[in-house]
Image (cartoon, rainbow, N blue to C red):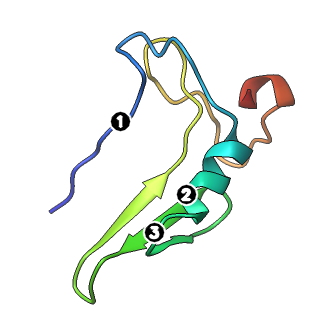
Amino acid sequence: MSYDLTIAKDEKFSTSTSFAGLSAFLRTLGGVKPNGNRGFVFESSRVRHMEIDLEVVNDEGDNIEEAGERLSRDQLY
């Protein structure tokens, strides 16, 4: 079983944060480890884990990244 959750300031995605800042914050959390270039994993036990995938989204919350595409500095901030 899996669930997708989105964390945003509001329904309009009116603010954003830098990948570097969010990545640094996630690294300070207990049990959270990097998992690839843009992801993290939280392992709370041997039988449960949570994958955290960081995405760049548009104003509607739709992912605007293309697989393997490098985003410009403007798109990350």
Q: Secondary structure at mark 2?
A: helix
* Tag in front: 1 or 2: 2
- Residue highlighted by disc 1: 6
Q: Residues within 10 Å of mark 1 (few under 14, many from 20)?
A: few
Query: Which residue type does callout 3 highlight?
Result: Val
Q: Residue placed at 35% from the left, 36% from the top?
A: 6
Q: Nearer the viewer, residue 12 or 37?
A: 12
Amino acid type of the residue tagged 1 in the rendering: Thr
Q: Which residue is mark 2?
A: 26
Q: CA distance from mark 1 to mark 2?
A: 15 Å
Residue drawn at point x = 75 percent, y = 42 percent: 69
Q: In which quadrant is the C terminus drawn? A: top right
Q: Position of residue 76 (x, y in %)?
A: 73, 31
Side of 71 where 21 appears, left or right: left
Q: How many marks?
A: 3
Going from the N terminus, do you reach mark 1 or mark 2 first? 1
Which amino acid type is marked by label 2? Answer: Leu
Quarter of the image where one finds residue 16: top right
Vertical arrangement, residue 29 with respect to residue 71, above or below: below
- Asked whether disc 1 touches disc 3, contact meaning CB atoms under 8 Å apart, the reply is no
Q: Whole-percent x and y of residue 12? A: 42, 10
- The image quarter containing residue 64 is top right
Residue 48, above or below 67? below
Helix, strand or loop status at disc 3: strand
Query: For mark 3, what is the residue?
Result: 41
